[in-house]
Amino acid sequence: MVFKQWLIAAIPRPSPVQVGLVLLWLALLVSALGVVYATHQSRQLVHQLELARRESAQLQVAWGQYLLEQSTWAAYQRIEQVAAERLDMHVPATEDIVMVKQ
Amino acid sequence: MKKRSKQGYPEAPIARWRFYGAGALLCLLGLGLLWRVAGLQVIPGEDKGFEFLQDQGVARTVRVEPISAYRGVITDRRGEPLAVSSPVVSIWADPGILQAGQPDTAALAKALGTSGTALEEKLQRFRDREFVYLKRHLPPQDADKVLSAGVAGVFAQTEYRRFYPAGEVASHLVGFTDIDDRGQEGMELAYEQWLAGVQGAKRVVKDLKGRVVKEEKLLRAARAGQALTLSIDLRLQYLAYRELKTTVTEHQARGGSVVVLDTLTGEVLAIANQPAYNPNDRRRIRPAEMRNRAIIDQFEPGSTMKPVTVMAALETKRYSPRTLVDTNPGHIRVGRKTLLDPKNYGIIDVTKIITKSSQVGLTKLALDLEPQQILDMYFRLGLGQSTGSGFPGENVGLLPSRSRWQPIERANFAFGYGLSLTTLQLAQAYSVIANGGLKKPVSLVKLARAPVVENVVDAQITRQVLSMLRTVVGPGGTAGRARLDAYSVAGKTGTVHKVGPQGYAVERKMALFAGIAPAEKPRIVVVTVIDEPSRGKYFGGEVAAPLFSKIAAGALRLLDVPPQQNSRVAGQAPRPGRAVKKEPVG
């Protein structure tokens, strides 16, 4: 009891100005930590953006390569050869064409 | 303390100067500290001041990163790729680090696929430099193999290489780029600004692990190359190229060209030349193969210009398709020269002059007209001017203008000598006939909107000429072999003597055919030119007309033009058909 009374007596009663200052100081601290946190977040996001951009560039490259591959497989020369030799196809003669009038 | 001093110790007075001296010293220390802080952070120009410190910081974290930009893709009108950029890796070395005589050069040379001595020599030769290419344009997987060896002083750099999936089929039109990806020929050159991508750069902050954590500034915006859609249809292009190559080989000709023009829009649907080259492997390329003959080479058009002279004659209103002309006795003397028909056609009408390609008949027409009238008609059809294609090195041909014309010059001029044009110009001139007198600029790029047309000839006259041209393909005409099974054709043959060192060379000829199909409702103009066929046959009707027939038949089918003749219509009784011919698909 004695100790508690002593303690109350020892700590001076803060004036409203002092309370305000302490609150402001705490707010400052929280805000400073917030800036740190936000910066960290932003850096991580920028890094992710960069990774995504790199991936997009790689996909672009892959697209080009697939495009080349596709056009090589689908070259008219090759299609013609496959159609004529492997599938035994030919262009129908004019007499064989039947027109469908609408 | 006070108590004690009161108890016994006398109060020693402190000298004032010591008090102030100590105070001043403390102040000075504080000022010195402030000065130092200011020097580090604020005052410019200080040795190892804030500029130095910031530089040091920046040097450790801020990097300039390139933003890559690709060269645009070139496609045909249906989106089939004709030129695509793909990354390749160039391997370079710093001869300061990788010196000749090091043990790992042998392994490196093996990985690069070159001889060890050649590599040693190169490193020796460039030993004072800091950069030397070891191998350019390696496929990425091969480059990885080289780099995985981990030889010190060997680096990689990503570059772009152009690949041409259509190969030689569209080589002349598309052109190619050099090793640094700049357009050198063809549309690659014509649309360099449009296609080229501009690499950008940005300043970024990197962390310890090399990750980008902040983008500070965009130093240069990257501009990706734009895609270019050409007017050609690769299916038609392939068909035209294949048939042209077959014909040129069959007749052992020096070369040849084909142009297929869309009469509705003026777009070029196919433009093929022989000889051609493979744009993907240009090591053994010869300059003669690189020329887009259809646009660059000019020649005298010969008989293919006869319909144009007839148009000029019809325009005077003194002639109609039925006007009779006396071609007896089958030859005519003009100046010191005699012009011959193969046989005496007697009295024939203007239509028959075209059907038989009569020299005598046309000479009579020409001598009855003012040369200026013929010249004017040639000019209105686009001769002696650019077609508007924008192709690099396009030839505008030659349309002479004289103040005085000798009779023989007038006659020659009327049947296509003494002027020159390109295959593309010839196609454009015929498209005016096909279009009812409307002239459209030729386009090598797919058009987004309808072209600006110019009415240069009366539609009535072109209709008459078109029906005259149909007789050329009919019985008794010079180009029966240009006929199509399913469509009507109008066209004109030409067999031209080439100019050699000693005037016209008898044995050097060009076979031409310019045709319009279908004749009732023209959709395409096809011009075929075979340069110096050397297997005995050389007439336009024998060499160029069959080529026209093959290309036009396939082209009209691919363009979904409904057949007009010789086809059965559903619901009607089938006519007795011929045996099924087997023809390759194309």
Image (tube, coloured by chain):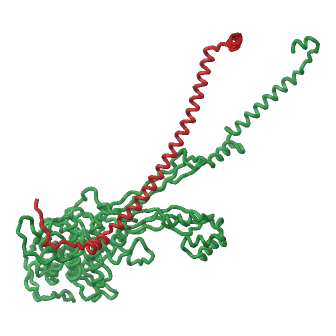
Chain colours: A red, B green
| Viewer-nearest residue: B416 or B508 | B508
Classify residue B303 as left or right of residue B326: right
Quadrant hosting residue B476? bottom left
* Residue shown at 45% from the left, 54% from the top: A57
Q: Is residue A93 visible?
A: yes
Residue B82 against residue B285 in the figure, above or below: above
Quadrant hosting residue B24? top right
Give the image location of residue B375, x and y in percent. 22, 73
Residue B424 against residue A11 in the figure, above or below: below
Classify residue A35 as left or right of residue B8: left
Give the image location of residue A94, x and y in percent. 14, 72
Quadrant hosting residue B15? top right
| Residue lying at the far front of the rendered structure | A1
| Viewer-nearest residue: B441 or B72 | B72
Q: Is residue B415 visible?
A: no
| Viewer-nearest residue: B68 or B196 | B68
